[in-house]
Amino acid sequence: MMLTGAGSPGNVWAQSSLTDTWPIHDLPELDGQVLFDHAVRHAAAVDNGGHVRRLPVAVLKTRSVDDVVLMVANASRRGIKIAMRGQGHSQYGQSQVEGGIVIDSSLLNAVRWHGNDTVDAQPGALWGDVAKLTLERGLTPPVMPDAMMLTVGGTLSAGGLGETSYRYGAQVDNVLELDVVTGAGELLTCSPERHEELFRMTLAGCGQCGIIVRARLRLIAAPSFLSIHPLLYDDMDAFLSDQARLTTVAGLGPLNGRISASQDKGRDGHWQFTLLAGHEVADAAEGHQPPDWIAGLRCKSAAAATTTTYRDYLERRTASVVAGRARRVANAALVATLPDNAVRPFLAHVLATPEASVGIWFFEVAARVSGRHMQPLQKTASGPLAFELRMQRRAAGEGAELDAMLAANHALLPRLQAAGGKIYPPYCPILTSEQWQTHYGAETWRRFAAAKRRFDPNNVLTPGAGIF
């Protein structure tokens, strides 16, 4: 093990703050580095939201699973908070640890074949790296996120959603096995057949019961080309109803919807709805032929289809996400699902209320078949059909505009929960204890709390999520 950062301004503070609870000489012997320098600690003190800052005392640049086991066990014995951090794409400080230890997973990034049709991925592996390997054999995970620079450990701890979730559920519904380091520092392999409760309470568990150090992923055949059809609507009900109808179309691929400011300023509401539906094609020529499922849809018009390779489809947002992070603009997203019977009044409220829609620059609405989300902690609104709402807000700075966006999200939370909505934790303000219990429901909350006591008895794991 190496301790680095000696002599830096932050190092004196870091070491002295550990003196009472974790003497430096008592750190375990590790393959990686424990970093105390100012720059590394401050980089780990923020996430993609840019408005929550929690300064850790040190960052472990882990190089092995043993590093994670030893550091978590040591932290647990001394009651020091600890969390794994991937790319820091959460928006409300969920991966941050004030006065504790952040484990940087970036070097724990291997992706390897297991047999012919599954892969094992470490937590720091990017989904782009997973795709690069699996596409060599014409395979893909059933659900891929919209940003290939997200980590496997990060999205599986949150749930993991994508444009094929209406068909395959969340990413956590397509995991076959995990290696998990519990809050007590025990390394366990778990699956539906082995240590099942740890498996269920780790997937979408926000790092509360254990840290994922390996995930075995199910794969399916990948399309060679996708043809994406943009369908334009000026009527919200038609937009939502057509999405619901398309969830039943056999062979349909990606499905998503967007709401944007209308260019027609003379129309009431000033909002336009775009449905994006894709299907597999053999080549670009076939992609321009309208598929049978378009017939009978209630769209106002259809823009020209775009045909792309599946690999390019996966990378469709990489450049914009990288550019957005480089600008270091504060974000205040709110992502949730609502039951079909509640989504229309909720959307009408947001779109008609300036205080509720403040700062929204990207608004996605995607149909979800609730019964295909099977993991207990990945909560989706009840009923046969739900709609996922992704309200991405962006501020020019950290002043009144950011405060207004944060206030808008907090104000919408009671309305969401009263309507039977379920939040997506990494892109939602931290809930109160009462709100968390409402979110999970009484039975799941009791189960989750029991698992927390069992697998993290000293309550050291992932405090930034604010659940326990």
Image: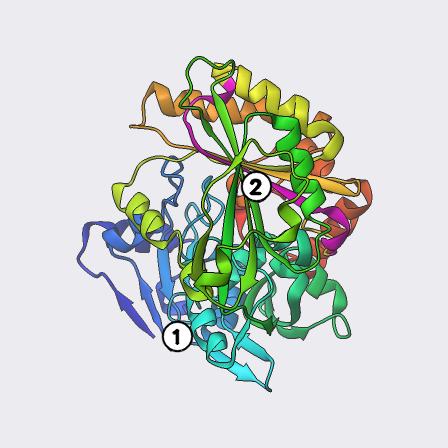
Q: CA distance from mark 1 to mark 2?
A: 28 Å
Q: Position of residue 189 (x, y in %)?
A: 65, 75
Is 372 included in the stretch rendered in magenta?
yes
Q: Position of residue 268 (x, y in %)?
A: 51, 13
How many marks on residues?
2
Residue 300 got which mark? none
Task: Tell me the quarter of the picture where residue 63 sits.
Answer: bottom left
Instruction: Kindly give the residue lying farthest to the bottom in the view shown.
Output: 115
The residue labelled by disc 2 is: 466
In the image, the segment drawn in magenta is: 356-374
Is 249 included in the stretch rendered in magenta?
no
Q: Residues within 10 Å of mark 1 (few under 14, many from 20)?
A: some
Q: State the residue at coordinates (32%, 22%).
A: 399
- Residue type indicated by callout 2: Gly
The residue labelled by disc 1 is: 63
Q: How is the image coloured?
A: rainbow
